[in-house]
Amino acid sequence: MRSFSLRESTLASPMRSIRALSIHRFLFRFSFAGVNIFSWIFVFQYFFLVEPDIAHAFVRTALLYALSQTITCLVTPYAARLLRLGARRLLMFATLVAASSFVVLGAAFAGFWGGSYIPSALAVFACGLGFYRALYWIPYEIEVEATGVGRRTRLAEVCIALAPLLAGVFIAAMPLGPVSLLFAGVTMILLATVPVFYLREVRERFSWGYRETFGQLIEPANRSVVGRTMLEGAAGAALLLFWPLAIFILTGWSYEMLGLILSLTFVVAILGRPLVRRGMRTMSSHNSAGMDVLFAFTPWVLRMLVATPLGVIGVDSYFYTTTPRRIGLDPLTYEQAADAGSFVDEFTALKEMALALGRILMCIIAAVCALLFTLPMAFIAIFLVAAFASTALVLAPR
């Protein structure tokens, strides 16, 4: 059931507020595109130094990511209720929580608390990102799309796509590169809070209680939407966490090469996707179920076979130019949110929780396979699960 909205009239929304949201989103997405995935790379490297082998480092990284998703799942119902106090306040608080999480990680790697406290700091970092994801709701997204003022331009997307390359070069060029990148990212995130002050306030009413929300999660009537969203979450974890880890290992643990591959792939996708989709429409294949299944399944199979950076660029370019867009998946920032992060109704919170559960499930599969078999076998299992999840999403009724 649609919640009662305390939202102000869309027609009365000032253009200044919409422009402020656009500036905030650009600054925030640019900073996350540069720092988010590299932060998990740093975590993986730390575990590699303290664990007996790379498989155990991989397992601990996966479990830490699962901890972050657990926090998101548990906090989301409460965070949705806080929208009654105002989405602008919540947006500001979530942005500060995200910045604080990277501050904790940077301080830990800088030796601020000593080596014995780094594991605790990593747990705080993961929990902080989990809180951020639960609290970060984008107000006025409907108004932005309706007016077109804040619509993502191709130039802005290309700038954000270049952030991983800039981050990789920054790490290599700066002393204490990882720590410097984390604090630079914090600076950008804090800068993104300035436009939030110019947003008008929006309030939403979330009618479900905390326990009722979890009850709705297992309600038979919601089984279809929850199951489909869990599949999206599982595929999202494979794409946004485990695939970049695989690329990093494949490139010989090179920050610059990882950043170059990611940025080049995204730029090719941004510039090439309209041409590819136009060609598919010309061939009348864009509505073909068989083609959709092919484009959903084959990129994951190809990811199991690539062995060179050039192969990675080719596979990802194929994936991003052919795969239908998924609402809420932002590969440039390694983020995934229900309903594109904009609160629509109670089911937005339900889907956010299901996304987190899907990511947790994928992390468990990855950890178990890495412990029982080998790291390459774990990656194969992850990509196979993602392939079948993506295919099921294509075939599932909407």
Image: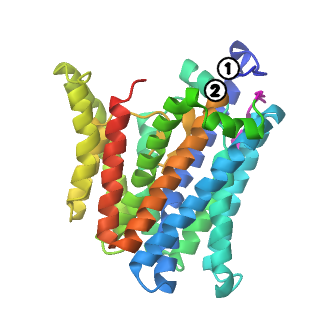
Report the span colored magenta.
194-207
Depth check, front residue: 107 or 222: 222
Name the secondary structure under disc 1: loop
Name the residue carrying label 2. 344
Residue at the image position 66 percent from the left and 43 percent from the top: 136
Rendered image quadrant of residue 204:
top right
Q: CA distance from mark 2 to mark 1?
A: 8 Å
Rendered image quadrant of residue 77:
top right
Name the secondary structure under disc 2: loop
Where does residue 202 sit, x and y in percent of width and height? Answer: 76, 28
Q: Is residue 155 magenta?
A: no
Instruction: Pick out the residue farthest to the top.
Output: 11
Mark 2 neighbour class, 10 Å CA radius: few under 14, some 14 to 19, many 20 or more: some
Where does residue 378 sit, x and y in percent of width and height? Answer: 34, 65
Q: Is residue 206 magenta?
A: yes
**Residue type, mark 1 in image:** Arg
Q: In the image, is residue 241 above or below residue 218?
A: below
Q: In the image, is residue 145 above or below residue 322?
A: above
Mark count: 2
The secondary structure that dominates the magenta segment is loop
